[in-house]
Amino acid sequence: MTIQDIPARISISQPMIDAYARLSGDFNPLHVDPAIAAATPFGGTIAHGCIPMEPIFQAAQALIGKPVMPPGSTMSLRYLRPSQPGDTIHLEAQPEEVATDGARAFAFACVNQRGEKVIEGRCTIPVAP
Amino acid sequence: MTIQDIPARISISQPMIDAYARLSGDFNPLHVDPAIAAATPFGGTIAHGCIPMEPIFQAAQALIGKPVMPPGSTMSLRYLRPSQPGDTIHLEAQPEEVATDGARAFAFACVNQRGEKVIEGRCTIPVAP
C-alpha cells in the first residue's frame, strides 16, 4: 500500500472538541464556548491542536500496519491555520523512497475542505523491532 | 513566565483512551481492548499517539498566553516509547533565547512517572499577528 492510497481524514464537530476538552482538561472558551469564540477574530470555536493531526497518525499507522508509532519515529509539523467545527481535514501525502533498512518516510499536508493547508510536515518511521 | 515553571502534565487512563477512540474513530484493540492488548509485547493497552503530546500544547499555550498555536508554529517530535493507562506524563522544557522579533522556542521531553522520556523534540512559536 502506498501512502497516497490511504484514506485518512477527520470531520471536526463541536461535540468532538468538547470531548477533547474533557479528555485534556483544556476548556478554554475559544474551544468550548461558541458565543465567546464568535466574538473573536476566529469567528467561532477552534479545535485543539492535535485534532487536525489525527489523519497523520491514521496514515502512518495504516502504512506500517501497526497502531503505534515505533520508537524512533519522528514527525515535524508546521501549523498554518486553525481548524473549526464543520471542517473536514484530509491528508495529502508524498512518499519518499523506502530506505535500505525498510524505514519509511513521507511528506504531508493536512488539508481542509476549502483546499487550505492547515498543517504541513514530514514523518519518518523506522522498521519496528 | 518561563517554560520551566509551567505545570504541564496529563494522567492517562483507559476511559481517556476510550474517549479518544470515539473522537478519532481509532478503535484498534491495542488501544481499547485490555484483554487482547495484555497478550501483546506491550502487556496492556497503549494511548493514541497524540495523548502524551498534550503537555506540549499546554506549555506552549501557557507560554504565549493564547489557546492556539499561531500560524507558523513548528513542532518536531521523536517518539521514544508508548504510554499506557496509569502513566502520568509531564513536560520538561528548556527555553531558548527569545528571538529579536519575540519568537519563542523550547526544547522539550515528555517524561513519564518512571523518568523515562516518551517523546522529545522542539517547538518554535512566532509572534502572533
Image: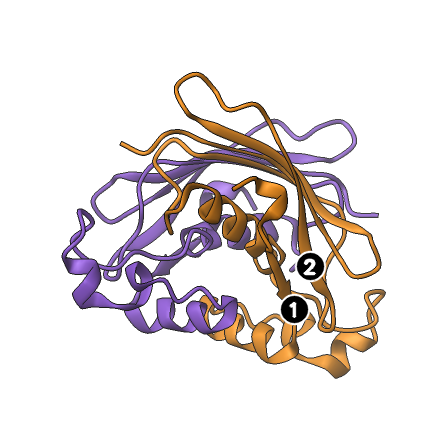
Chain colours: A purple, B orange
What is the x, y in percent for residue A17?
36, 66
The amino acid marked with disc number 1 is Ser
Quarter of image, res A27: bottom left
Residue A120, percent from left and from top: 42, 35
Q: CA distance from mark 2 to mark 1?
A: 6 Å
Q: Which residue is mark 2?
A: B89
Secondary structure at numbered mark 1: strand
Residue at the spot 25% in from the left edge and 68% down from the top edge? A33
Which quadrant holds residue B113? bottom right
Label 1 chain ID = B
| Depicted A121 relative to depicted B119: above or below | above
User: Which residue corresponds to the image point at 61% horizontal and 70% vertical from the top-left?
Assistant: B28
Q: Which residue is mark 1?
A: B11
Residue B59 lies, in percent from the top left, at 53, 48
Of residues A87 and A105, the one drawn nearer to the viewer in this rendering: A87
Label 2 sits on a secondary structure element that is strand
Q: Nearer the viewer, residue B61 or A44?
A: B61
Q: Disc 2 marks which amino acid?
A: Ile
Residue A90 located left or right of residue B94? left
| Precedes in sequence: disc 2 or disc 1 | 1
- Which residue is at 15% across, 59% downward? A38
The image quarter in which residue B15 lies: bottom right
- Is residue A86 depicted above or below B97 in this figure? below
For label 2, the crowd category at 10 Å Cα-Cα, with few meaning under 14, some 14 to 19 and many 20 or more, is: many
- Whether tag 2 and tag 1 are in contact, CB under 8 A, the answer is yes
